[in-house]
Amino acid sequence: MGFNRELVLEVFFACNKDEELTANYLLDHGHEFDEQQQ
């Protein structure tokens, strides 16, 4: 999906290893992380 590996792992563990919840969170909030990195 084009997300940073460290970010995906951080969100994955924060979501109690729920893959679907992780994907939904990244799709809904991924742009927020892009803005923070700039």
Image: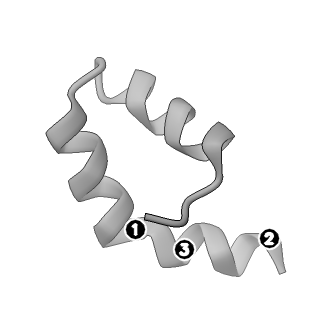
Using the image as rendered, state which of residue 1 and residue 13 is in the foreground: 1
Residue at 53 percent across and 31 percent down: it is 9
Q: Is residue 14 left or right of residue 34?
A: left
Total count of labels: 3
Give residue 36's position: percent from left, percent from top: 73, 72
| Crowding near the residue tagged with mark 2, few <14, some 14–19, many ≥20 C-alpha atoms within 10 Å | few
| Secondary structure found at label 1 | helix
Q: Residue at x 54, y 74 (%)?
A: 32
- Three-letter amino acid code of the residue under disc 2: Gln
* First-in-chain label (3 vs 2): 3
Q: Which quarter shows the C terminus?
A: bottom right
Quarter holding the N terminus is bottom left
* Disc 3 to disc 2, C-alpha distance: 9 Å
SS of the residue under disc 3: helix
Mark toward the start of the polypeptide (1 vs 2): 1
- The residue identified by callout 2 is 37
Q: Quadrant of residue 33?
A: bottom right
Give the Cα distance between marks 3 and 1: 6 Å
Establish if 24 lies above or below 5: below
Query: Is residue 18 depicted above or below 30 in this figure?
Result: above
- Count neighbours of disc 3 (C-alpha within 10 A) and say few if under 14, some if 14 to 19, many if 20 or more: few
Q: Amino acid at mark 3?
A: Glu
Picture quadrant where residue 28 is located: bottom left
The residue identified by callout 1 is: 29
Say which amino acid is labelled 1.
Answer: His
* Callout 2: SS: helix
For the point 45% across and 38% down, the residue is 11
Q: Position of residue 30 (x, y in %)?
A: 47, 68
Residue that numbered label 3 is attached to: 32
